[in-house]
Image: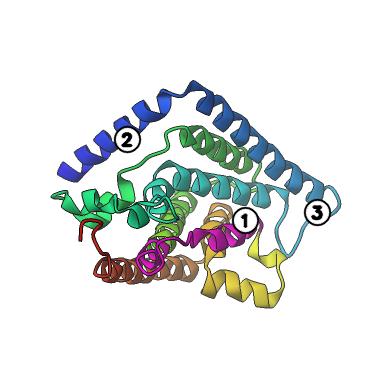
């Protein structure tokens, strides 16, 4: 309960900080609408020429786009702001501001992961979920309770995988504080807005086993349509658990290399 109360305090403080700049709200709103429009337009153009691509039709691909937008919104809301604030020339590790995080009587990984929030991303989250709902209403088969549970399991695994990747990059910052490692991941993550089946075989292997962004979005979309087997869901959950354990170990190992700004 203590950690839940802290999360509430972090969220409120972040909202108060961002609410002071009204222009940021309108800029974020415009960016969200443009991101949604370009994503939907790309899917509509693609399926305006063909009906299916490797088993994916318009409805299933819209569901995947909705999942992508939802996961991206969750990253912007609370997964990314804190961890990404560690890196770069003005990051907390380089400037020594990370000292204040270490001094707090709270688990360092928890504090480094959740102390900063981006409340305006709630609008992105609403848009992403809206696309998922619209796609579900267009499905040829009825959405069952089993499909919904499978979707939540796959989405939870996908969000955990995304957090683990960001946490691992945050751990690497302790070796090279001035490098923003996520710029490579950001470019690859853009591919997750389309089904894995659209890409060549070698790239599919990369998106599943090397940088598993395909698992983050494709599997939840498959779960909604009933195309994800129990084995796939179990594999996603197992991969999420393994990556979380590995990323946590890397982050804590990196902490040992941090030299205080006052030392």
Q: Residue 61: where, in percent of width, then height?
A: 67, 52
Precedes in sequence: disc 2 or disc 1: 2
Query: Which disc, if any, is residue 51?
Result: 3
Contact (CB < 8 A) between labels 2 and 1? no
Q: Residue placed at 48% from the left, 36% from the top?
A: 121
Main SS, magenta residues: helix
Find residue 202 and report its horizontal and vertical position in percent: 66, 78
Alpha-carbon span between mark 3 and mark 1: 23 Å
The residue at which mark 2 appears reads as 11
Q: Give 252 or 157, whichever is nearer the viewer.
A: 252
Relative to 41, residue 12 above or below: above
Magenta-drawn segment: 168-194
- Which secondary structure lies at badge 3? loop
**Mark 1 closeness class: few <14, some 14–19, many ≥20 residues within 10 Å:** few
Residue placed furthest toward the right: 49
Q: Is residue 60 left or right of residue 21?
A: right
N-terminal-most mark, 3 or 2: 2
Residue 185 on image: x %, y % = 54, 62
In front of the other: 24 or 191:
24
In terms of depth relative to the viewer, which is nearer, 204 or 251?
Answer: 251
Residue 185 covered by magenta stretch: yes
Q: Nearer the viewer, mark 3 or mark 1?
A: 1
Q: Which residue lies under the disc numbered 1?
A: 190
């Amino acid at each position: 309960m203590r950690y839940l109360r802290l999360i509430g305090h972090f969220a409120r403080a972040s909202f108060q900080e961002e609410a002071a700049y009204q222009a940021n709200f309108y800029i974020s709103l415009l960016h969200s609408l443009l991101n949604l429009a370009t994503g939907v337009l790309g899917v509509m153009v693609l399926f305006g020429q063909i009906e299916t691509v490797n088993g994916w039709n318009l409805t299933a691909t819209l569901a995947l786009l909705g999942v992508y937008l939802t996961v991206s919104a969750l990253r912007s809301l609370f997964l990314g702001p804190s961890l990404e604030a560690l890196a770069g020339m003005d990051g907390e590790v380089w400037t020594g501001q990370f000292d204040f995080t270490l001094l707090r009587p709270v688990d360092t990984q928890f504090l480094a992961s959740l102390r900063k929030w981006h409340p305006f991303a709630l609008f992105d989250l609403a848009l992403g979920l809206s696309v998922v709902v619209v796609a579900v209403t267009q499905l040829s088969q009825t959405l069952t309770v089993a499909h919904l549970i499978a979707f939540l399991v796959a989405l939870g695994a996908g969000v955990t995988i995304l957090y683990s990747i960001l946490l691992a990059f945050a751990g690497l910052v302790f070796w090279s504080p001035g490098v923003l490692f996520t710029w490579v991941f950001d470019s690859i993550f853009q591919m997750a807005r389309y089904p894995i089946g659209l890409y060549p075989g070698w790239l599919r292997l990369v998106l599943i086993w090397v940088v598993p962004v395909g698992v983050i979005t494709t599997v939840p979309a498959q779960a909604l349509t009933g195309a994800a087997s129990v084995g796939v869901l179990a594999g996603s959950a197992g991969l999420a658990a393994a990556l979380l354990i590995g990323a946590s170990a890397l982050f804590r190992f990196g902490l040992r290399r941090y030299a205080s700004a006052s030392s």
